[in-house]
Amino acid sequence: MSEAYAHPNYVKIWIWLLVLLGLSVSGPMLEIPTLTIITAFGIAVVKAFLVAANFMHLKFEKKIIWFLLIMCFCMLGVFFFGVAPDIMMTEGDQWIDCIADKSCVEQRL
Amino acid sequence: MSMHGPVATHRSATGVPTGRLAVWWLMASEIFIFGGLVACFILFKLNGTPGFEDASLTSLTAGAVNTFVLLTSSLSVVMAHAAIEKGDRDKSFLYIWYTIGGGFVFLGIKAYEYTGKIIHGHVITENLFWSFYYTMTGLHALHVIGGMVIMALISFDIRKGHNYQRVELIGIYWHFVDLIWIFLFPLLYIANF
Amino acid sequence: MSQATAAIQTDTHAEHHEELNFLHKYILPVDHKVIAMQYIFTGLIMAIIGGYFAYAFRMQLAFPGELVPFYGLVGPGEYNMLVTNHGTIMIFWVAMPVLIAGFGNFLIPLMIGCDDMVFPRLNRLSYQIFLVSALVLIASFFVTGGGFGGAWTAYPPLSSVAEYSLTDWGASLWILAVALEFVSFLLGGINFVTTAMNARAPGMKMWDIPIAVWFIVIAVILFMASVGPLIAGSVMLFMDQRIGTSFFLPSGGGDPLLWQHLFWFFGHPEVYVVLLPTLGIVADIITVFSRKKLFGYKTVIYTAFATGGLSFVVWAHHQFIAGIDPRMANVFVVTTVLISIPLAEMMFSYIATLYGGSIELKTPMLWALSFIAAFLIGGVTGIYLGASAVDVYLHDSYFVLAHFHYTFFPITIIGMFAALTFWFPKMFGRMMNETLGKIHFWGTFIPFNCIFLPLFFLGLAGQHRRIYNYNHFPDLATQELQNIRIFATVSLVVMLCFQLVFVYNFFVSMFKGEKAPENPWNANTLEWSIPSPPPHGNFKTLPTVYRGPYEYSVPGREMDYWPQHVPPEES
Ligand code: HEM
Ligand SMILES: [Cu+2]
């Protein structure tokens, strides 16, 4: 069942992952929230990519698998941005006080 | 090569072996399950829902150690795959059990964390943050347990000389569980504001 | 030399086909055809339950407060429970298992020319989970408080707070059953997709796959891509119910709208999940019975992709008046109206296939044609609803109800009968009785229209859904409107009676019908190249494919069909 492809050096990848882990943990120590976000999530993405490409052998996988995974994230993006306006923008709760609305109502009256 | 099961199982029109293709589809559906949950979490968090500042109460050390454990177990499961490719069953068996050991350490730390939190009154119903915390880590822990059980079964299987390809398949799954954690870690432990 | 290898191959094959005992053949099967039967029969039994519920609540609407024969009194809570579970059963336990799991299991390996699914035991497992989910759902009717009554959409807080729904355990078992069903279909779906991608017969390229297989696979992919967030959501809802979290409760910081989004992000693709298999089945039937090549085979598949893609960006048209952001509502109006373009194109392709064909009105063809006719009405009324301004008035009225029954009934019931009558000879090795089949067809199709056409008018008159007794509403309690309700109910009873014809025909033909030849309809696809019913392992020698599935009436050939597995003649 074995297919012939050159293996990446797994231990080297692992060391890289640990270095990144160290970075993401020390990120918050600088106490700059924006930087924390960037280090925390940026590094998570890099780590995820390293694991996927090397350990999961995505590097050697057929294009169709890449396509499949990328589609997944696109769909999740659609979900997120479709829902976000409702969950995150609460100005609708105060439409009663909305100026445009008020003037509109007054005009009618 | 012995032929088990129907001919269908041994065909490969795409060029990707059937087992691996199926595991990728499984991963795709898992991405949606976890992705949906994480998306909901992010929505509430960005919305400034009260309670999410409790993220500062989670233990960064415990989370970081657990990340380390999972990353290392990922290394050992991929080593198991490399070993079985060379036909070295015993070494592969050993590496699989290192991975399972990693799973146990992970769950132990998790249990310790849970106990500490519950003792301090941070139960699942306290607020939305803790609801998400327990749901997400709990679902993840279930995946860890499932992976450990399957891995144990596979380890005995390959020692008898069957189904070598399954080491790679469980490996992909295990890395995926690792990946989920890589994202849960900053979400629940680092981004505490 | 080559003979020797052939001998070895037949040997391994023979070993594979050893006789199985009853337990392994019927109770714990791994053969895809037996599993298909399990799904189909389970689905049909659930359809009887769902139909019985519909009978009970329609009787209550026509004759409010009176004793319903064969049922008893329908109280308000019970009415809600009946409506909720009718909807849930028909979508998740009838349409999905019969059309996707049942016919998917039966058709995919046969049509792509292999001996089984790629993971036979996973296949069995997914049926078993499905069966458990059905049993959990049925159990939920009998717990204290009765079955869940918060509508198949299960909006919180009604569904998550026991004091509101008054069905403490009913609600939890309901969500549990639905979640189990999702898991079962995820496992089954992975199997289907992998099989269709990897296990095709040599020579069968992408564009040689029959539309039925294509569409079932696309449907499964849509399902897999949309259900994930809802699985997470149902875990959250379950915890809201049982543990006391408040993911969807504003009092604890949660958001009920979030559930609606999770539900409809799945719910709208889901309607295409059940639609596509039927469209595929219909495509196969109309080509066979009009002896013509499918018009625009590739176009039809591309439109399915377009529909599938678009179906992910229309979900909020179910929430126009739920308090969603009006700017988003605009976006969703546009996408909703857009989605009718690929669907319309597909319909045109089907109609163009009929044009100039030598049409033979056998029972399956009648079902297929009536599907197109009825579905068109459903689709067109959907466009009305997609305009948010119109929807403000029509939302949750009987107009919506009639709209989706004009889509779901053709898909589920008509599609199921089309497929059953078409593949019956292959499944059971006997022919069905044509005359009885036609009686059943007309006895179903005419009453179907009599039930649902009037409901459009009731909806326009302002009749709201999910109300158990209209006598409480003076505007709606008029005799005129009541007469329409009675007419619809009587039509339903007539339709249900005609189903007995089908049951009789089905079972008598199964045992006493005329023996079916290999290829009774002179069709091209691979399943018609083997004995009816196919033996364990399907093909004596696995076939090779030489051409697409719709080569009917090819000029210059004396036969008007050209099976996929027949090698081209040497010239
Ligand atoms: C041409 C394409 C279609 C369009 C534009 C369309 C549009 C709509 C809209 C706007 C609604 C919401 C109405 C409301 O609640 O106020 C709706 C409801 C519904 N549609 Fe469609 N639809 C289409 C096709 C379908 C198909 C193919 C199916 C089924 C297979 C379907 C099943 C449903 C169901 C079940 C509901 C009601 C859900 C509920 O509230 O319980 N629709 N449709
Ligand atoms: Cu919709």
Image (cartoon, rainbow, N blue to C red):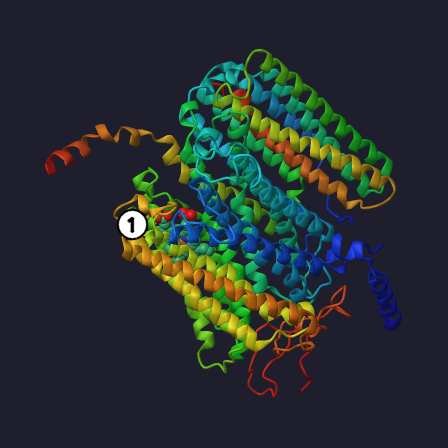
Which residue, given by chain and number where applicable, does mark 1 sit on? Answer: C477
| Along the viewing direction, whichever of C550 and C414 lies nearer the viewer | C414
**Residue A19 is drawn in which quadrant?**
top right
| Along the viewing direction, whichever of B13 and C183 lies nearer the viewer | C183
Q: Is disc 1 surrounded by few (<14), some (14 to 19) or many (20+) residues within 10 Å?
A: some
Q: Disc 1 on helix, strand or loop?
A: loop
**Drawn side of residue C66 relative to residue C294, left or right:** left
Is B192 located above or below residue B86 in the figure?
Answer: above
* Residue C222 x %, y %: 52, 51
Is C64 located above or below residue B132 in the figure?
Answer: below
Residue under the image location 28 percent in, 48 percent down: C393
Task: Report if residue C333 is visible in the image.
Answer: yes
**Residue B24 is drawn in which quadrant?**
top right
**Drawn side of residue A20 relative to residue C391, left or right:** right
Is C368 located above or below residue B181 in the figure?
Answer: below
**Drawn side of residue C446 relative to residue C393, left or right:** right
* Residue B123 x %, y %: 55, 18
Count of residue discs: 1
Q: Quadrant of the N terminus of chain C?
A: bottom right
Whether label 1 lies within 8 Å of ligand 1 gets the answer no
Is A42 located above or below residue C490 in the figure?
Answer: above
Residue under the image location 79 percent in, 34 percent down: B152
* Residue C394 x %, y %: 31, 50
Q: Quadrant of the C terminus of chain C?
A: bottom right
To which chain does the residue with label 1 belong?
C
* Residue A70 x %, y %: 54, 45
Residue under the image location 51 percent in, 39 percent down: C229
| Along the viewing direction, whichever of C544 and C290 lies nearer the viewer | C290
Farthest top residue? B120
Task: Report if residue C208 is visible in the image.
Answer: no
| Along the viewing direction, whichever of C360 and A47 lies nearer the viewer | C360
Q: Amino acid at mark 1?
A: Ala
